[in-house]
Amino acid sequence: MHGSTSASGTPAEGTTDRGHRWRQLHRIAPLLLLVLGVVAVFGSRRLGLGELTAPGPGLWPFIVSLLLTGTAAVLVLLDPAEDYEPWTRGTVRIIAGLVSLGVFILLFQTFGFVVSAFLMLVLWLRVFGGESWRWTLGLAAGGTAVMYLLFVELLGVPFPDGLVDAVIGG
Amino acid sequence: MDSWSGIVQGFSVALTPTNLLYVFLGVLIGTVIGVLPGLGPTATIALLLPITYTVEPVTAVILLAGIYYGSMYGGTITSVLLRLPGEAASVVTTFDGYQMAKQGRAGPALGIAAVGSYIGGTVSVIGMILLAPPLAQLAVSFGPPEYVALTVLGILLVTYLGTGSVLKSLSMAALGLLLATIGLDPITGTARFTFGEVALFNGLDFVAVAMGLFGVGEILHSLERTDKVQAVTSKIKGIWPTRKDFRDSSGAIGRGSLLGFAIGVLPGGGGVVSSLASYAMEKRRAKDPSRFGKGAIEGVAGPETANNASSTSAFIPLLTLGIPPNVVLALIFGALLVQDITPGPQLIEQEPEIFWGVIASMVIGNLMLLALNIPLVGFFVQMLRVRAGILAAFALLVTMAGVFSVNNNVFDMWVVLGFGVIGWLMKKTGFEPGPLVLAFVLGSILERAFRQSMLLSGGSFDIFVTRPISGGMFAFMALIIIVSAITSRRRKAVFGRVDPADVDETDETDPDADRQVAAEGSPGADSTTDTPTDGPSGSTSTTPGER
């Protein structure tokens, strides 16, 4: 909410330029909602609305998506820009972090919990947390062990078979 | 069953070793996360949802409730010592609490907050014992139209009270309702919006959605702000307040208890609104209002009492009507649903051990908090040394492993990640996740009640207004919409000017002058609640540098 205040408040050229581009960009959020709403309206009509006396599967989704479409349409026109936070350098880190979480899920499926958890902790502690290598490796190894004990031994969660299980099993 | 035998049964449930352990864990975790600025009660409860399936339903609620009211205690500590609210409801405490700390009276500030919270919690429990059974009795006669009215009212009030932009919240509520329709139609069995994906036939998993939006979303959002938290080095002395302190704050505690209780029961109420209302009330009542913001002990005692009282009484609508009045309670509601228990008017009759057990656990939990807080404040402050990066890494890993454990399904991990992205983007773009999750939880109840009402009435909407209770509720909603439409224009005019100044001034010296504008008019409360939720990021970013 203070994002736009600072963007428009500073007279420096770079920031005004960014602020201007920003103003164009920020309407994407309600636009996306609008598109989603319209798609849902048609989707629910296809499901069959039925009658009010005998509602079909699509009637309730239809009502709800009309509400979404309506509010989103007004927001596209009226949305106050000051609720939007600016994108910072931190944003890039967050996106990298999200990608790493996706990679974690893929690793988890193929290599099991131990390897993927250790790697994820190393990445997050070292790169995103800025910890020293000593802390990183210690915490990652200890953390993985504790989590494994907690989830697999204590709660009996059947994580996908991975490298470690193969080693232990063999 | 009369209340007395209910209470006896409740204590026999709450005093079992397992439940004692879980109430202790709950209040301890709650206090810790209340202290840690990055992690609020909502995120924590979302993260811990998977664990609750491994225990009995009553134990699950005891744990989650403990986290909720425990966080109200914990948030106080950092507000007083660092002017850094650990969770939104403690923002008000920074006004006078931090000033008291500067004058060397951090101990009494924390002490009176703990005592006040204890009293507020206890008063609320008593109120709950008196009010909940008759309310449930009344609600037993509710038919589908009343449930439509009640759920719509709940969603509407959360929408109106939760944030500055009502429209954005409404669209999020609509999105939540839409997401709730994914899966097989409960009546005809038609697959809706599943895109042929079998994993979607049962709908999106509530736990995955909540963990994504609140857990992953909030962690990412807090990680983006790279505030450095500074640990307190000075010793806190004399935590037990003096007799004069007690005398000065007894009125504030009494009023805070009642006010907090009343606000907590209302949909959309809860910690933030109640603490702001209490602060405004104390300031208005004071003989010398200028003391406020300069270390007036009433300014700590009242709001701290009120927020704890409200976090307890918020359980009343959940356990008697089956309507969660705020987001934290929506998560607890979801936890119960997954355990195949639908909270509602029948709960007290059919599952008395849950209702009375939770009440009894609150009595015990509040005592534990009092015992924990007075001697262990120094220990909790040390928690601030845990760096945000470490916290985030472990919280994310627990989230991912935890969500897998619910259905042993990798698909849910992708759902968490997807909703994590959405949650973070929503934070960035000023959309509140609260109404979405609340609507998502209530969506299937609302749809079923709506369709049943239509069948009952033969397709006529008259049924909603001709029945007295649902008609009354819809009239009330209409009133809210009209009043807020009238006041919002005025509010926009006021806040459009005040907002930037508000942020600046908070960072300088006198935080309450402009806050008070926000807190005073009660219709203005809807935007007030927004201020504190954004407040921590606004005020904390500069505060540590100041010290």
Image (cartoon, grey):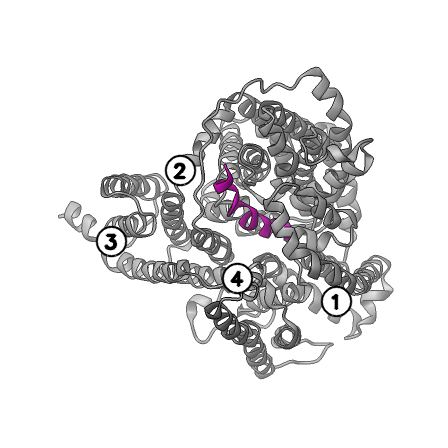
Nearest the viewer among A75 and A115 is: A75
Residue at numbered disc 4: A85
Q: Nearer the viewer, mark 2 or mark 1?
A: 2
Q: CA distance from mark 4 to mark 3?
A: 42 Å
**Is B541 included in the stretch rendered in magenta?**
yes
Crowd rating for badge 1 (residues with CA inside 10 Å; few <14, some 14–19, many 20+): many
Which mark's residue is nearer the viewer, 3 or 1? 3
Looking at marks 4 and 3 on the same chain, the residue that comes earlier in the sequence is marked by 4
Q: Are tags 4 and 3 found on a single chain?
A: yes
The residue identified by callout 3 is A161
Residue B148, given in percent of the width and then of the height, sits at: 73, 62
What segment carries the magenta color? B531-547
Which of these two is toward me, A37 or B166? B166
Graded by Cα atoms within 10 Å as few (under 14), some (14 to 19) or many (20 or more), the crowding at tag 4 reads some
Q: Is residue A114 left or right of residue B308?
A: left
Kind of residue indicated by mark 2:
Val
Label 3's element?
A: loop
Quadrant of the image occupied by residue B8: top right
Q: CA distance from mark 4 to mark 1?
A: 43 Å
Q: Position of residue B142 (x, y in %)?
A: 77, 55
| Distance CA(mark 3)–CA(mark 2) | 33 Å
Chain on which label 2 sits: B
Q: Which residue is mark 1?
A: B453
Residue most extreme to the left: A170
Query: Badge 2 is on which residue?
Result: B386
Q: Is residue B361 above or below residue B156?
A: above
Three-letter code, disc 3: Asp
Circle 4 marks a residue in which chain? A
Q: Secondary structure at mark 1?
A: helix
Task: Say which residue appears at 63% left-offset and 41% top-offset.
Answer: B509
